[in-house]
Amino acid sequence: MLSEPNRPLYEVKAGLFKGLAHPIRIRILEVLSAAPEASVSELIAATSLEASHLSQHLAVLRRNRLVVAERRGSLVYYRLAYPQVADLLRVARALLGEILETTQSQLLEHGGLPEIPPVSVSP
Amino acid sequence: MLSEPNRPLYEVKAGLFKGLAHPIRIRILEVLSAAPEASVSELIAATSLEASHLSQHLAVLRRNRLVVAERRGSLVYYRLAYPQVADLLRVARALLGEILETTQSQLLEHGGLPEIPPVSVSP
DNA sequence: TTACGAATTGATGAAATCATCATGTCATGA
DNA sequence: TCATGACATGATGATTTCATCAATTCGTAA
C-alpha cells in the first residue's frame, strides 16, 4: 500500500471527507460504527441498494481508508478501518444537532408571515 | 434561512462533509479554527488564492453552514459557524495521524525489496 | 470441471464540482 | 455623484462524481 506516501497529506485528508460526502456512504459508515462488522448482503439490506451500486460506494470508502474488507469464504465483511471514523460521525451528528437547533430557533424568531394590517373600511 | 428544513437531514449532513472535501476549504477552516475570525484578505494571504476563487470556496462553506460572514464597512470577516467544526477538524487530524502511523508501520514491515540470496559460485 | 451465489470491476451518460476569467455589488471617500 | 477597493456572483470548459447496466472475478459445492 504505497499510495499514501505518494499522495500529499492534504489530499489524503480531503479524501477522508470525500468518502463521507455522500448520504449513502454516511449510512454505510453509521451501520459499521454500530456493529463490529457487516457483510455486504447486510449492507445491501441496510441501504436498499443494488449490489453493484453498493460495491462502487464501498470502493470509495476503501480507497479513502475509511473501511477495510475481509473475505471469508465466499462472503466479504466490512468494518471501520479506524475507531476515529466513528468519532467523526459522532461529531458530525453533534454539529448537525446544533445546526438544527439554531435553524429552529431562527424560524421561531422570524417565523410566519408579517401580520396583515387590519383593513380600514372607508365610510 | 429556510433551506435547512426543506433539505433532508442526510443531505444536510453530506453537505457538511462536502464542504470539507477540498484541500483549500480545509485550509480555510483550519485558519478559522486557529483564530476568532479572519478577513477575506487574510484568507487570501493564507491560501494564496485569487479573490474570486476564494469567494467561490467561501460560498460553498457558507451554503453548507460551516462558516458565517459578517460585513463591517467595506470588509467582510469570516468565522466558524459552530465550534463543532473545529472538533471535526481535530478528529480528522487524529484519524489522519492514525492512518499515517499504520501506513508507516506497514511499510516498515513489508518495506524494501526481498533480499537477493547470496550467489553460490560453482566450483 | 462446472454451475452458482456473492461481490467487484468496467463502461457510460448525467450531474455535480472545480478552476478561471468576466462582470456585478457593496461601502466609502472625495 | 463618481471612482475605487473589497468581495461576490455569473459563465464556461474541464474534471470528477454519481447512478446504472454489463461483464468479470472469487469461493464453494456438486
Image (cartoon, coloured by chain):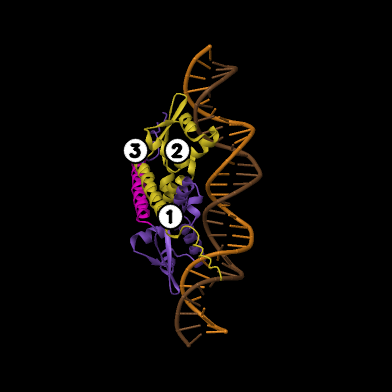
Chain colours: A purple, B yellow, C orange, D brown
**Of helix, strand and loop, which one carries label 2?**
helix
Please provide percent x and percent y for residue B67: 42, 38
Give the foreground label among 2 and 3: 2
Q: Nearer the viewer, residue D11 or B83?
A: B83
Residue at 48%, 43% in the rendered image: B23
**Of helix, strand and loop, which one carries label 3?**
helix
Cα distance between the residues tagged 2 and 1: 27 Å
Q: Nearer the viewer, residue A46 or A78?
A: A78
Residue under label 2, please give it.
B28
Q: Which amino acid does label 2 sit on?
A: Ile
Whether callout 2 and callout 3 share a subunit is answered no
Cα distance between the residues tagged 1 and 3: 51 Å
**Residue A84 has which mark?**
none
Q: What residue type is labelled 1?
A: Thr
Q: Quadrant of the N terminus of chain B?
A: top left
Q: What chain letter is assigned to the residue under label 3? A: A
Mark 2 or mark 1, which has the lower sequence index? 2
Q: Nearer the viewer, residue B96 or B91?
A: B96
Residue under label 1, please give it.
B103
Callout 2–callout 3 Cβ contact below 8 Å: no
